[in-house]
Amino acid sequence: MFKKMLQAVGVGGPSVDTVLSEEPSRPGGHLIGEVRIGGASGEADIQKIVLSLIAEVETDDEEKQGLEFQQVVAAEDFRLEAEEHRTIPFTIPVPWEAPITAVHGRPLRGMRLGVSTQVAVAKAVDTSDMDPVRVEPLASQQPVIDALLAMGAHVKSADLEHGHIHGVHQEFPFYQEIEFFPPPQFAGQVGEIELTFISRPDSVDVVLEADKRGDLFTPGGDAFGRIHRGHEEALATDWEAEITQWLQAVAEHSGGHMVHGHHEHRQHGSSPGMGGMLAAGAGGLATGAVGGMVLGEMLDEGVDEEEIAEDVAEEMEDEG
């Protein structure tokens, strides 16, 4: 009886540890791992083990919030005997719109994405675990990033913003922006470049945004463009040529490419090519949320953001 009382307040209950495969996941793929549970001082009736993918998203008021965008039940309704240990394998489908957290094995500064493990225990305090998740680009996304890097752009950071992209079919109430310092040849004319992918089973939309710097005679503003490709077609696209042509148009401030003024968690406009104009707007949050602060604390381990920023600065100095 005393042991049951202790378990009811969280003492002597089962421990939980989620172990993920060392292989990175990709949008449209799977996250593979196992839940290791056990070590309770007495019997424990496990009602359910639920795994959720959670991302830190910047909301309309610029607050950070943990947002759940995928959930699976790994096991339910079983008894764990005293001191018994079990290993429960699981597979989580990774949505096509899942954000990228690493490029060439290197974490993207600012991205916080994790898998939460919640264990519901009958007549006892529930237990949980949180682990960072590594998602690498799709084969059709990687050439776009590589093209920017080959042009001399440098990754600055990345984040998730609440909103929808106008003219693009989108399942999630948020989208990712990967920010780059501009290539040297455009450094005086264009500020940061932001890259967004919206992927689906048969294709990918590549959305670009650049900050056009103004002068005494010409106002600055944000320029946007979108290009749609099938996955196989994206592999054959000359992305350096596409992006260079678009940046030249932005730098020259040629007609139709610019939207003046500041944008807020906007909806993007689109056209068949890179010259599409974007309009403002936002969609509503539609999935479950957890504390963003807790998510950030749990996922900070192993990612030294200051070190990454210093490395980028050193690379820019070496090339300068």
Image (cartoon, rainbow, N blue to C red):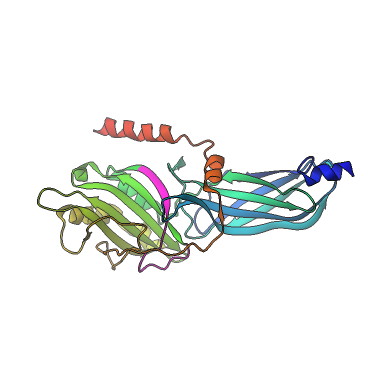
Where residue 24 sits in the image (x, y, percent)?
53, 47
Q: In the drawing, does residue 29 fall left or right of residue 268? A: right
Residue at image point 46% right, 62% down: 173
- The outermost residue toward the right is 1
Q: Is residue 77 above or below residue 318?
A: below
Q: Is residue 202 left or right of residue 275?
A: right
**In the rendered image of this protein, does residue 319 appear above or below residue 2?**
above
Q: Is residue 86 magenta?
A: no
The percent position of residue 67, horizontal first and vertical second, equals: 53, 55
Quadrant where the C terminus is found in the figure: top left
Can see residue 188? yes
Which image quadrant is residue 48 in? bottom right
- Decide if residue 20 is in sight here: no
> Residue at left 60%, top 54%?
52
Q: Nearer the viewer, residue 216 or 274?
A: 216
Magenta range is 156-172
Nearer the observer, 42 or 65 = 65
- Kindly identify the residue that appears in the image at 82 percent across and 53 percent down: 79
Q: In the image shown, does 267 or 132 lie closer to the viewer?
A: 267
State which quarter of the image contains the N terminus.
Answer: top right
Q: Is residue 297 left or right of residue 320?
A: right
- 295 over 92 or under it: above or below: above
Report the side of 281 relative to 125 (left or right): left
Residue 283 x/y as whole percent: 43, 65
